Image: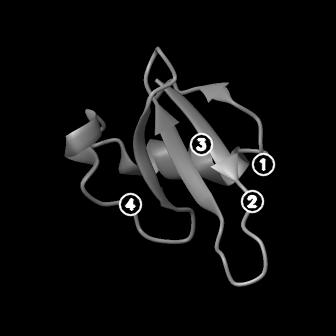
């Protein structure tokens, strides 16, 4: 799974994208909202680790997600 942080413009907030091994979009959520429904993406119980990864992400840099 891959993760990328997308910079918002003006009134559009920053977003996080989760993509599978073939780079197909599987999740898209606001970076400033609490993480929920992570069980849908196989990340149940990893909220704290994922929040740490999101905080350290640079905008526009695709990164392999390892939590």
Query: Which residue was labeled with disc 3?
Result: 53
Binning the other alpha carbons within 10 Å of mark 4 as few (below 14), some (14 to 19) or many (20 upward) gives some
Binning the other alpha carbons within 10 Å of mark 1 as few (below 14), some (14 to 19) or many (20 upward) gives some
How far, Cα to Cα, is label 4 from label 1? 19 Å
Residue at the location (24% across, 55% down)?
37
Q: Look at the picture and state if 9 lies above or below 66.
A: below
Q: Look at the picture and state if 2 lies above or below 22.
A: below
**Label whose residue precedes the other's in the sequence (4 or 1):** 4
Binning the other alpha carbons within 10 Å of mark 3 as few (below 14), some (14 to 19) or many (20 upward) gives some
Task: State the SS at label 1.
Answer: loop
The reply to whether dot 1 and dot 2 touch (C-beta < 8 Å) is: yes
The reply to whether dot 4 and dot 1 touch (C-beta < 8 Å) is: no
How far, Cα to Cα, is label 1 from label 3? 12 Å
User: Is 58 in front, or is 26?
Assistant: 26
Query: Which residue was labeled with disc 2?
Result: 7
Query: Which residue was labeled with disc 1?
Result: 59
Query: Which residue was labeled with disc 4?
Result: 35
How far, Cα to Cα, is label 4 from label 3? 12 Å
Percent across and percent down for residue 27 are 40, 45
Residue at the location (53% across, 45% down)?
17
**Label whose residue precedes the other's in the sequence (3 or 2):** 2
Residue at the location (75% across, 59% down)?
7
């Amino acid at each position: 799974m891959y993760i990328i942080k997308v910079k918002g413009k003006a009134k559009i907030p920053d977003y996080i994208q989760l993509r599978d091994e073939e780079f197909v979009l599987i999740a898209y959520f606001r970076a400033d909202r609490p993480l929920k429904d992570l069980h849908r993406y196989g990340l149940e119980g990893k909220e704290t680790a994922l929040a740490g990864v999101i905080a350290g992400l640079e905008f526009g840099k695709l990164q392999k997600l390892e939590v």
